[in-house]
Image (cartoon, grey):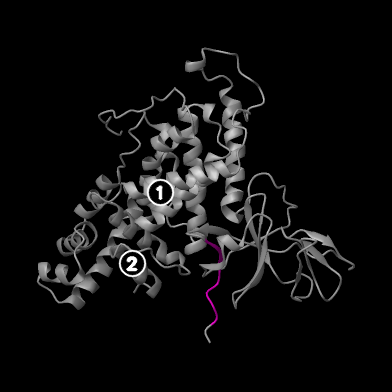
């Protein structure tokens, strides 16, 4: 018999609802895939609604206007020969492909942790992705203007979310050394551990420590902004 | 091979998009359809489509040409879909394979998917009651009650039938892969 998670997933699909998350077993995968394929084959359902297309266009306009970038800077290092401006020919196809691959790498990173390509990670950071998670609201967008930081406590996890350079980042609010709760020093834009003089940046990087071994950077949360609120992907609240 | 469709071209492959809005207009339906085929529900397909464009447009070099832009959007979509499954189920239930990449097929045929044909082929292999329950529930949008009435069985049995039929279809799909 299929598990409860699979049955609920299929029932949601058939009701046209967003299927709920659950921890799928390897044995569930074929059935889930079959249900999706069958449902996706229903006639007349596969096209996007006009409302969605218009709404996303509006969102993109806002997003792109918020942080103008220089679109004329080519990703490819080798400038191609100048050809008729309206019908430029592809030059350096390989370098374009390589550039696209590099960007896709950056996008993968972005999709995972909500940060853009610009920040060089220190390599040690981890994104916390719970087996069973949901998007949980931690702040109104209006309370997180550029440069602002908000602490949050979701019962299962605590953390801080900040908007820096137009990007949202959320990190754990627990010191990676021995688990003391970090305190926000808003003026210095850092998180201080009350136990052993350790400090972290809002991005999770370790800034200062007096320990024999540097503690790991703070885990990140996935973070998103939707309908005027900021959400992190976190385990559901504890049952009271 | 995919049949060539009546062309509804706005931009011809080999040419260039004038700006990001043209990229969006020309590709939003394509990306959405790809996602819908892989998640089977509107809410997720919309969120994932938005995620693709939000992630892709800023670093996008519009002058890269239509084929490159589409390949890049496709690669982004693949990453976004993988992230979706990691977040929601912890397993990669579906993925965007190379054979679905729009750049691999002639201009604008990519919007058409061969999913309906594959689905029909799977259904045709099932025993009659299995085929009918899946047809009624998944393709004809019948409630379990309506499907039970159409099949002349109890609601409880229709549910059992649906579970069995789905498992059987899943096995057949595995073989077909």
Residue at 38% across, 45% down:
A54
Residue at 72% across, 51% down:
A121
Q: Position of residue B95 (x, y in %)?
A: 44, 50
Q: Are marks 2 and 1 in contact (CB under 8 Å)?
A: no
Residue B109 image-quadrant placement:
top left
In space, the residues marked 2 and 1 are separated at their CA atoms by: 25 Å
Report the side of B108 relative to B98 (left or right): left
Residue A29 image-quadrant placement:
bottom left
Residue at 19% across, 64% down:
B142
Task: Inspect this view and state whether residue B126 appears.
Answer: yes
The vertical placement of A197 against B112, above or below, is: below
Report the side of A55 relative to A63 (left or right): left
- Secondary structure under badge 1? helix
| CA neighbours of label 1 inside 10 A, class few (<14), some (14 to 19), many (20+) | few
The vertical placement of B116 against B158, above or below, is: above
Residue at 35% across, 28% down:
B10
Mark identifier at residue B71: none
Q: Main secondary structure of the magenta part?
A: strand
* Callout in the foreground (2, 1): 1
Q: Position of residue B33 (x, y in %)?
A: 35, 45
Q: Which residues are magenta?
A: A229-238
Q: Nearer the viewer, residue A163 or B75?
A: A163
Mark identifier at residue A12: 2
Give the residue pinned by disc 1.
Answer: A55
Q: How many marks?
A: 2
Q: Position of residue A116 (x, y in %)?
A: 63, 47
| Marked residue chain, label 2 | A
Q: Position of residue A66 (x, y in %)?
A: 58, 44
In the rendered image, the quadrant that contains the N terminus of chain B is top left
> Is residue A235 part of the magenta span, yes or no?
yes
| CA neighbours of label 2 inside 10 A, class few (<14), some (14 to 19), many (20+) | some
């Amino acid at each position: 018999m299929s598990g409860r998670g699979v049955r609920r997933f299929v029932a949601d699909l058939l009701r046209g609802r967003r299927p709920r998350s659950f921890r799928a077993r390897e044995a569930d995968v074929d059935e889930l895939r079959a249900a999706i394929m069958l449902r996706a084959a229903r006639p007349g359902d596969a096209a996007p609604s006009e409302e969605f297309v218009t709404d996303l266009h509006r969102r993109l306009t806002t997003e792109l206007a918020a942080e103008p970038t220089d679109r004329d800077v080519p990703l490819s290092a080798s400038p191609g020969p100048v050809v008729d401006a309206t019908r430029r020919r592809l030059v350096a196809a390989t370098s374009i492909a390589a550039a696209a691959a590099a960007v896709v790498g950056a996008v993968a990173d972005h999709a995972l942790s909500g940060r853009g390509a610009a920040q060089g990670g220190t390599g040690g950071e981890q994104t916390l992705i719970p087996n069973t998670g949901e998007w949980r609201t931690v702040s109104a967008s209006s309370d997180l203007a550029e440069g602002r930081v908000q602490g949050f406590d979701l019962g299962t996890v605590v953390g801080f979310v900040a908007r820096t350079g137009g990007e949202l980042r959320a990190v754990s609010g627990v010191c990676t050394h021995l688990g003391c709760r970090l305190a926000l020093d808003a003026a210095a834009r850092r998180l201080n551990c009350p136990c052993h003089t350790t400090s972290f940046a809002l991005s999770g990087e370790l800034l200062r420590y007096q320990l024999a071994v540097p503690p790991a950077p703070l885990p990140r949360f996935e973070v998103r902004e939707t309908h005027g609120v900021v959400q992190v992907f976190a385990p559901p609240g504890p049952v009271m | 091979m995919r049949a060539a469709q009546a062309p509804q071209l706005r931009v011809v492959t080999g040419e260039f998009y004038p700006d990001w809005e043209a990229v969006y207009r020309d590709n939003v339906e394509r990306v959405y359809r790809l996602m819908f085929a892989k998640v089977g529900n509107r809410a997720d397909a919309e969120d994932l489509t938005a995620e693709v464009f939000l992630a892709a447009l800023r670093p996008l070099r519009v002058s890269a040409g239509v084929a490159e832009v589409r390949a890049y959007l496709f690669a982004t979509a693949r990453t976004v879909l993988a992230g979706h499954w990691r977040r929601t189920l912890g397993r990669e239930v579906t993925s965007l394979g190379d054979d679905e990449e729009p750049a691999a097929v002639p201009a604008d045929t990519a919007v058409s998917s061969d999913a309906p044909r594959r689905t029909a082929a799977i259904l045709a292999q099932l025993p009659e009651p299995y085929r009918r329950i899946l047809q009624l529930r998944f393709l004809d949008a019948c409630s379990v009650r309506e499907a039970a009435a159409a099949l002349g069985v109890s609601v409880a049995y229709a549910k059992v039938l649906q579970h069995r039929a789905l498992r059987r279809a899943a096995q057949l799909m595995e073989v077909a892969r």
